[in-house]
Image (spheres, rainbow, N blue to C red):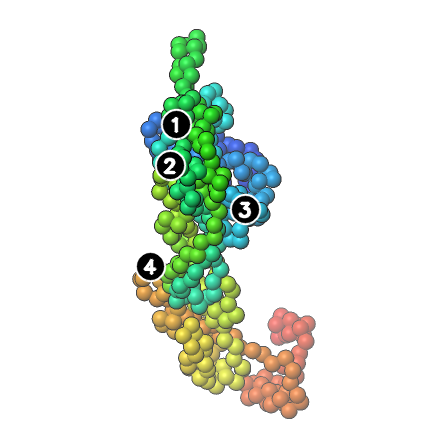
Amino acid sequence: MSKRDYYEVLGVGKEASETEIKKAFRKLARQYHPDVNPGDQEAEAKFKEVNEAYEVLSDQQKKAQYDQFGHAAFSQGAEGGFGGFGGGGDFGFGDIFDMFFGGGGHRRNGPVKGADLRYNLEITFEESAFGLEKDLEIPRNENCDKCSGTGAAPGSSPKTCPKCNGAGQIQYTQSTPFGRFVQSRVCDQCQGNGKIVENPCPDCGGRGTVRKVRTIHVSIPAGVDTGSRVRVTGEGEPGERNGPPGDLYIYIRIKPHKFFHRDGNDVITEMKISFPQAALGDEIEVPTLEGKVSLKVPEGTQSGTFFRLRGKGIPDVHGRGRGDQHVRITVVTPSKLDEKQKDILKQFAETLGESPAGVEKGFFEKVKDAFIG
């Protein structure tokens, strides 16, 4: 399963109370428990995901760490987490099964897909518009080269667990007033692996994996936005028992831009012009993602007017065309005028039928004129 956000897994928001988190957990646990869905591997994977999310969000200390660092707070071998990076954990079924059904759960002994990883990547506005190629340093677990992931020292191999005979689980028969019931619990000798490493590999200590930082080249497509997710298949944690590796998910965040603001695939730009430019019209230069272009501002343009530059916006991330750029005009009123400039404006006001005294009337005088005439 994908290493999704724990709040998303339980279907609650970050502001959810302990009671709401527990209620959501109990509902999903009943829905996906393996004993309720025998043989359904998808349900089993969802059950593990729900259990893992609850293990963290029900613990106030773990929840605080997760809220600050995300999955990186619980990555194997991480101290305080890796910047922008998250790994996965492995949780058994026993405790939750006891909570709802009074017995042990099933654990499959076949291949298990590796955990997915998350990397938070911040890019510039221009990079989001045109895409980029980038090398990322990804800390993750990888199969140990010395033992090829078996966990056993060279020249040896894992042995079949004598307690469960390689099944990874042990069956128990329980007699009740309603009859005899057969239940299964994870083998406590091999922890459900079905194998025991008697001679551990000196490099990985018998785990079969070691922590490494891997350089991965990724392509970020044009048009991504904050919250976009780019999937890199097979670059997550290694699988268990010859299972396939997980995937790497890159979550995008766009840095704010000095001039450009995004609205979907459109770009919004504000351009300030003077009163004479607005009144008489002018031709101004407007910055776009591909350089400056000329924009004709017609005479009499009012503050707040928008002009559209077709095709100067953001390319659609799915390849369906490109947005526009919208230029918002703001007419700037001068805050400091010398006497000559004031005289010119008074003369201008007179040509419009306004007296200089009228221009300088106070607020209460204007209110009085409006009601009395």
Q: Earlier in the sequence, mark 3 or mark 1?
A: 3
Judge the density around disc 1: few (<14), some (14-19), many (≥20) Cα neighbours within 10 Å. Answer: some
The amino acid sitting under disc 2 is: Arg
> Residue sitting at 43 percent across and 60 percent down?
135
Tag 2–tag 4 contact (CB < 8 Å): no
Res 277 seen here? yes
- Residue at label 1? 160
Callout 2 secondary element: loop
Q: Position of residue 343 (x, y in %)?
A: 63, 90
Observer-side mark, 2 or 3, equals 2
- Callout 1: helix, strand or loop? strand
In the displayed image of the protein, which residue is found farthest to the bottom? Answer: 340
Gap in Å between the C-alphas at discs 1 and 4?
Answer: 50 Å
Residue 47 horizontal/vertical position (percent): 42, 33
Q: Secondary structure at mark 3?
A: loop
Query: Which quadrant holds the C terminus?
Result: bottom right
